[in-house]
Amino acid sequence: MAEIFTSAFWAEYGGILAEGVWDTLMMTAVSTFLAYLIGLPMGVVMILTQPHGIRPNRVVNAVLGWIINIGRSLPFIILMIALFPFTKFVVGTKIGIKGAVVPLVVSAAPFIARMVETSLSEVDAGVVEAAQSMGASNFQIVWKVYLPEAKPSLVLGGSVVLIAIVGYTAMAGTMGAGGLGDLAIRYGHQRNVPSVMWITVIFLIILVQVVQSVFSRLSVRIDKRLK
């Protein structure tokens, strides 16, 4: 462990650690963006189609809820292996950053959908009814009422999603996806260089702390109730 404070350690492993951090950040950023493109609309539809929603539809709500629950119940490692053929079909490879993005998105999207649904359900029904009484369309209610009113909760939910995906990238590394998880396995375990494993753990802890701190402060800043 003490060798991580030596120049020899960083001369030998600094490059691969920097690459591992970059790969982890890339997987996290791309997967989060794509997962929100899928999960955010799913969460909105769940709110709109619930029995007391502005566009109730029991069939759509039940089917979508069933899909979300199945997606959330599958362990990531099992899901990643099960999706190998689909991943190869979509991006042409099962390994590397591209190979990890597909299962990361499939795993995170249902989680995001449920987080969005929970955040939007906290919006005061009176505000929604007021918008309806003024003739606002469903799209306007979603865009100008639901999302702005739930913004602090959505931001906090975003931090949870990001931290979860960071953890998923570490697990994906065990299956050849690259990133810090891959370094921990290849060097910390297979090559018996525990210092590399510990430094990857430290980097992951720092990354999680930064994400949580930034999103918590952002949530407080945009929360109208605290002004």
Image (tube, helix red, strand yellow):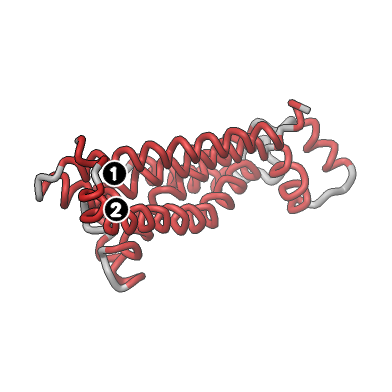
In the picture of the structure, the residue carrying the numbered disc 1 is 200
Q: Position of residue 17 (x, y in %)?
A: 29, 53
- Compute the Cα span from label 2 to label 1: 8 Å
Instruction: Name the residue located 70 percent from the left edge and 35 percent from the top edge.
Output: 221
How many marks do you count on the picture? 2
Q: Residue furthest top?
A: 226
Q: Which quadrant is home to the C terminus?
A: top right
Q: Position of residue 194 (x, y in %)?
A: 16, 41
Q: Residue furthest front?
A: 7
Instruction: Name the residue located 25 percent from the left edge and 63 percent from the top edge.
Output: 95
Residue 81 shows up from this direction: no
Q: Which quadrant is home to the N terminus?
A: top left
In the displayed structure, does residue 50 sit left or right of residue 5? right
SS under mark 1 = helix
Q: Position of residue 29 (x, y in %)?
A: 47, 55
In the picture of the structure, the residue carrying the numbered disc 2 is 17
Residue contact at pointers 2 and 1, CB within 8 angstroms? yes
In the displayed structure, does residue 176 sit left or right of residue 32? left
